[in-house]
Image: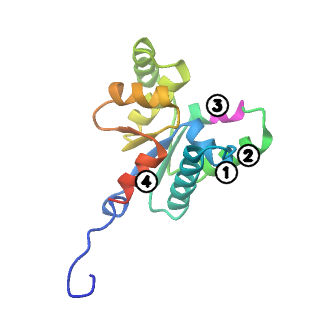
Amino acid sequence: MAEGGVTLPLPYFLRRNMRVYLDTCSLQRPLDTRSQIRISLEAEAVTGLIGLCVDGLVELVSSDVLLFETRRNPWSERRAYALTVLETATDFIRTDRTIRNRAAQLHQQGLKPLDALHLASAEAANADFFCTVDDKLLARGKILAQPEIRVVSPIELIEEINQ
């Protein structure tokens, strides 16, 4: 309760257990060279979001697709960083027939195969948000995702959390 007896609304993430799926690109954003303002802002947004996950205020969703793509990363520092972040996940989604079928649909509608698997995994996890820094995936995902999940950039996600 604020001064004067006025009750302030709780931030979105404190009103319910918000579930977030970070694709590999967004997961790696804090390690990118911050040569552009957008990259710096997205890196800070992802870092803040990871902090909320570590503090247990936001639920991070992981998947075998994220692990597969992370383990393929040739840079050991990036690989280790991503694996450490993914250890904070509260849910782990294994690819099954339903996810593969949904990913095939998404691929037919224009998503790259791994992007389609990521989005299908997020949908299967009942994530509230699917976060990416990939502009093409962001635009296409907003059109193709099931209505229960919002496809957002890290900056959009932080804005949503702070509402």
Classify 10 Å Cα crowding around label 3: few (below 14), some (14-19), many (20 and above): few
Disc 4 element: helix
Are discs 1 and 2 less than 8 Å apart at CB?
A: yes
Tag shown at residue 80: 2
Q: Which residues are magenta?
A: 67-72
Classify 10 Å Cα crowding around label 1: few (below 14), some (14-19), many (20 and above): few
Give the amino acid at mark 1.
Thr
Tag shown at residue 84: 1
Could you give the CA–CA distance between mark 3 and mark 4, rounded to whole angstroms?
25 Å
Q: Check the picture and name the quadrant holding the C terminus.
A: bottom left
Q: Where is residue 76, by image quadrant?
A: top right
Tag shown at residue 158: 4
Task: From the image, state whether disc 2 or disc 4 is nearer to you.
Answer: 4
Q: Check the picture and name the quadrant holding the N terminus.
A: bottom left
Mark nearer the N terminus (2 vs 3): 3
- Nearest to the observer: residue 74 or residue 100: 74
Residue 150 pos. (x, y %): 35, 39
Which residue does the image show at 46% across and 41% down from the upper left?
Answer: 153
Report the side of 68 relative to 16 (left or right).
Answer: right
Could you give the CA–CA distance between mark 1 and mark 4, rounded to whole angstroms?
21 Å
Mark nearer the N terminus (2 vs 4): 2
Mark nearer the N terminus (1 vs 3): 3
Could you give the CA–CA distance between mark 1 and mark 3, rounded to whole angstroms?
14 Å
Residue at the outermost top position: 108
Disc 1 element: helix
Give the amino acid at mark 4.
Ile
Tag shown at residue 112: none
Q: Height in image: 138 above or below 85?
A: above
Tag shown at residue 69: 3
Could you give the CA–CA distance between mark 2 and mark 3, rounded to whole angstroms?
12 Å
Residue at the outermost bottom position: 4
Report the side of 82 relative to 118 (left or right).
Answer: right
